Amino acid sequence: MTNPHPLPDQPIPDRVLRALIVDDEPRYLNSTRLLIAQHFGSVDTAATGREAYRLLEHNAYDIVLLDLMLPDASGHDIMRAIRARRPDTLVIVVSGDAAIEAAIEALRAGAYDFLRKPYEAEELTKTLRNALRQLELHRDNRHFQQRLQQSEHWHRLLVNLSPDIIYTLDAAGRFTYLNESVEGLLGYCRDELLGQPWTAIVPEEDVEGARHRMDERRTGERATRNAELRFRRKSAGPEAAHAAVELSALGLYRDGPDGGAEFLGSYGVARDVSARKEAEATVRFQAYHDLLTGLPNRALFRERLSQALIQARRDGRMLAVMFLDLDRFKVVNDTLGHLVGDKLLQAVSQRVGRCLREGDTLARIGGDEFLLLLPSIRSRESAALIARKILAALDAPFHIEGHELFVTTSIGIAVHPDDGDALETLIKHADLAMYHAKDHGRDGYRFFLPDLNALMDGRLRLENDLRRALQRGEFEVYYQPQVSIADRRIVGMEALVRWHHPDKGMVLPADFIALAEDTGLIAPIGESVMQLACRQASLWQGMGLSSVSLAVNLSARQLEQPRFVEQFTATLQANRLPEGAIAIEITESTLMRDLDGAVAKLKRLCDLGVEISIDDFGTGYSSLSYLKKLPIHTIKIDRSFVHDLDSDGSTIVAGIAAMTKGLKLNLVAEGVETRAQLDYLASVGCDAYQGFLFSQPLSAAQATPLLQPQLH
Ligand code: C2E
Ligand code: MG
Ligand code: MG
């Protein structure tokens, strides 16, 4: 490829010098040719006017030695023709005519010099030398012109190829020059801006700030360097209405007549930094927002809250901070996967967002936790109103990826100034109030109360107490019979943990299992339940009550332990129990947390003869279809459905029963309290039940007599 833009220093090649001798006398023609040949690259000769015309037609000569007296033409005519066609050619007129008039006439007509025949060789050489010097001057001049043009072209190109806008203004601030970049960058034609004031491309609101930068009068160090400005685009189109530029400008001066400097105008270079600005804005957005929901993050929330606090203190107004935590969101995430969980979070944040006014800030600060700032409220009741609005907005189910999901949230509210003045305190108190709401059955809101601090201390104390309970062996296992509906025989016992707290007396699982799960203490607690249950099973076996299987509840944390199966069998062996002596109960969410891992372990247990039940069935989000792939034997229908039988929850129970039968699984009902419930369960083909109707969970000592009739 050839370079369309020659470099400025590229040499211009010298042409070969060419001469023509026109003379009708062959003697002169030849001697002259010999004399001048050394100075020229090529020498042509013509003996007639006709020939001269022909050669001149097709060639460009630097010098023509022209005899004025030709047989067939006038030398003067030929010379005129040369002057007309090639004014650069030097014509040296040669004539035998001694008359000075002829010479004068020729010179007047534009001849370079005059030689009279016969001439001496020296005369000719001298005239030629002068002519050649003249030619050289011409050539230099031509080179110089060409160089100048090239260089000018080159500089224009550099200026136009520059991605920056380059301009000059006259002393009145009007554009006198603009490079082509202005067209690509701002969409203006150069011509429409030339003669216009610089304010034509600066947004009106920026004009004051740009005044001493665009038409800069300063020079040197003090002149504008990298000042950030905005230029207006002619028509915005898909791009932003303004381009962000960095401007460097300086004043242009020349020496004035009075010796001072005369201001000519200014010169500026503006670099388009829109892309960089956009990137910076993105980074800033990411630093201050949660990418999943697009909501502000904790950092931005704190900033807004600190601003709002300053305002509220100054105006003596109230503001509210709310802490929202979705109830049981973890179940969705664990059972349906993160994709569904993420979409649910997005949908929830949109719904909550619609309950708010402009100026309120909803931030996502982690997993399923949100903070909400109401920067100005009239009373505590206004905050309560918003909380109720949010709870109501979440009432309707969410439809995500083919699942119908119900979400509730617990909301804690702290109000400035009542519940705290400092930023940290307000957030902490809203958080505490949220826990308080959770403790009161979730799906509700609670205001901060001073004694909540004590409640939190209570959680900490409870955790310590749990650790001590493990060391001191404060756990006991109670047993609740599972009864066959067909023949009223006890077919199994469920092991349920009880804690004998030194001060509080007996504590039920509801009051410590969740915390034990949170802190990981559930693993050692579960292990100790397992030990106690095995010991009891071996005692009962020793008494000949071998038909009773003992079911132990397993938490996800236990199942997740890599050597769980080995530990399980080791515990059985230590108590001399056959593998089938202990059954296990797991919930749907435990299963789904790591389905593949869980299934692999359950298969191994199943192969050993361990019975596996799905506990609290119907409260998770498991789909029925995969149940048949799982190595399970029994489904335990959750007690909430049994409870709802009294108020027409029968379709769900009947549905679960039909499905269980279809999959050839056992069906056990939990929480059966009334005869009517039992009758209904019998009618749909339920195999066994558990509940207060037959017996509460009992200590081992209380449970043993119940098993006596089973002796055979
Ligand atoms: P779960 O496995 O569904 O156990 C049945 C719960 O229903 C027991 O509560 C039991 O006392 C209660 N219940 C039984 N019959 C009736 C009835 O007729 N009406 C009513 N209203 N309730 C009845 P408990 O013992 O308080 O245990 C609660 C939950 O704590 C258990 O639910 C289980 O998920 C968990 N849990 C108990 N012990 C352990 C354990 O050792 N390890 C693990 N990981 N979880 C345990
Ligand atoms: Mg259970
Ligand atoms: Mg249950």
Image (cartoon, rainbow, N blue to C red):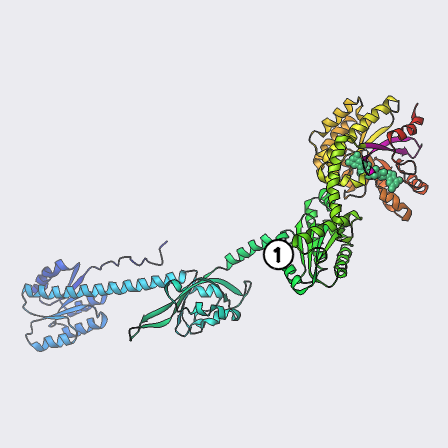
Image spot of residue 583 (x, y percent): 81, 30
For label 1, count other residues whose C-alpha is less than 10 Å away and answer few (under 14), some (14-19) or many (20+). few
Residue at x 32%, y 64% (from the top left corner): 152
User: Does residue 503 belong to the magenta stretch?
Assistant: yes
Q: For the residue with label 1, is its CB less than 8 Å from the closest atom of ligand 1?
A: no
Labels in figure, total: 1
Q: Which residue is mark 1?
A: 303
**Residue 524 in view of the camera:** yes
**Left or right: 671 as drawn, with respect to 106:** right
User: Does residue 689 belong to the magenta stretch?
Assistant: no
Magenta region: which residues? 476-505
Residue placed most toward the observer, 69 or 389: 389
Given the image, on which type of amino acid does mark 1 rest?
Glu
Residue at x 10%, y 59% (from the top left corner): 34
Where disc 1 sits, the SS reads helix
Can you say whether 75 is above or below 13 in the image?
below
Residue at x 88%, y 22% (from the top left corner): 543
Residue placed most toward the observer, 132 or 205: 205
